[in-house]
Amino acid sequence: MATHHTKMLIIGSGPAGYSAAIYGARAMLEPIVVQGLQPGGQLTITTDVENYPGFRDVVQGPWLMEEMQAQAEHVGTRMMWDTIVDVDLAGGSPFRAVGDSGDEYIADTVVIATGAQAKWLGVPGEQELGGKGVSACATCDGFFFRGKKVVVIGGGNTAVEEALYLTNHSDDVTLIHRRDELRSEKILQERLFASDKITPLWNKTVQRFVAGENGALHHLELVDTVTGETSTLEADGAFVAIGHAPATELFTGKLPMDDGGYLLVEPGTPKTEIPGVFACGDVMDHTYRQAVTAAGTGCMAALDAERFLATLEHAKAEAAE
């Protein structure tokens, strides 16, 4: 067990955490990144990445995260293979965090980049066909199903938004919902029902995703929630859209959150209600959830952390005079 001191502690990795680290290191803050259970975040389980700026050809998610990590280390970031299990933010800067390893981290600023995970149905074939027709992000993967038959599973805002987005790529979109009415906002429902490209399929749950001979998704096995009748539905792509779960359990009772568990920040900034504590990426963004937006807010968090420290130093200097 050891104690580590840093001007900027970044909890979590991925585009947000690594971008914060790059900017923080270049500002001579000597950041420490505690990488958590999934170093690199959600992109490490994403194969083809076609929408991250700067790459003409498709790149692989794990490779992109390896490059970001290497860049952060190159400019002076220290990576820790640890998971933060407790934080003390109440007393203000400096803050204290404890890792699963037993190590203690003392930090003048904290950047929270713990991310979020898509909620899954937990049915057979779902994980096995991930990247082979089953996805949780239409914005990320819809492009790969141009002119093909796709389905969206869910009934809330996320599902309806995904279905509407997919009409940019497909004329055959089916929305599967376990009830006979949607939970989404009325204006979204109106847009969905007005589209001649979307067919709602009511009172159905997905029991299994089934692969074809080529190893990719071929069809879904469905069960009627009213009659119990089973059926199949062929599809090239299936998008599970039942929400996301931000990784904020660590901060319960310590930082304000919205009803979905996302950390609340000052609008247009990554600033939490505690000065010196910042949140970036999917842990505070339930709207966009893209690698590029996560990276952008990571940059913002590092810049604001630098300004916070400069103000702190100025205040100390004035007090010493």
Image (cartoon, rainbow, N blue to C red):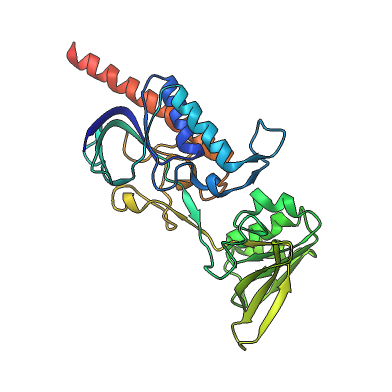
Q: How far from the left and from the top, in percent, is residue 319?
A: 19, 17
Foreground of the two, 41 or 246: 41
Which part of the image, by quadrant, shows the N terminus? top left
Which part of the image, by quadrant, shows the C terminus? top left
- Figure label count: 0
Foreground of the two, 10 or 161: 10
| View extreme (left): residue | 320
Q: Is residue 62 left or right of residue 164?
A: left
Q: Residue at x 41, y 28 (%)?
A: 304
Q: Residue at x 45, y 31 (%)?
A: 20
Q: Is residue 187 visible?
A: no
Q: Is residue 34 left or right of residue 223?
A: left
Foreground of the two, 233 or 306: 233
| View extreme (bottom): residue | 227
Q: Residue at x 49, y 45 (%)?
A: 41
| View extreme (front): residue | 213
Q: Is residue 47 visible?
A: yes
* Relative to 259, residue 224 above or below: below
Q: Residue at x 80, y 60 (%)?
A: 171
Q: How far from the left and from the top, in percent, is residue 44?
A: 53, 45
Q: How far from the left and from the top, in percent, is residue 228?
A: 61, 87
Foreground of the two, 167 or 133: 133
Q: Is residue 14 left or right of residue 97?
A: right
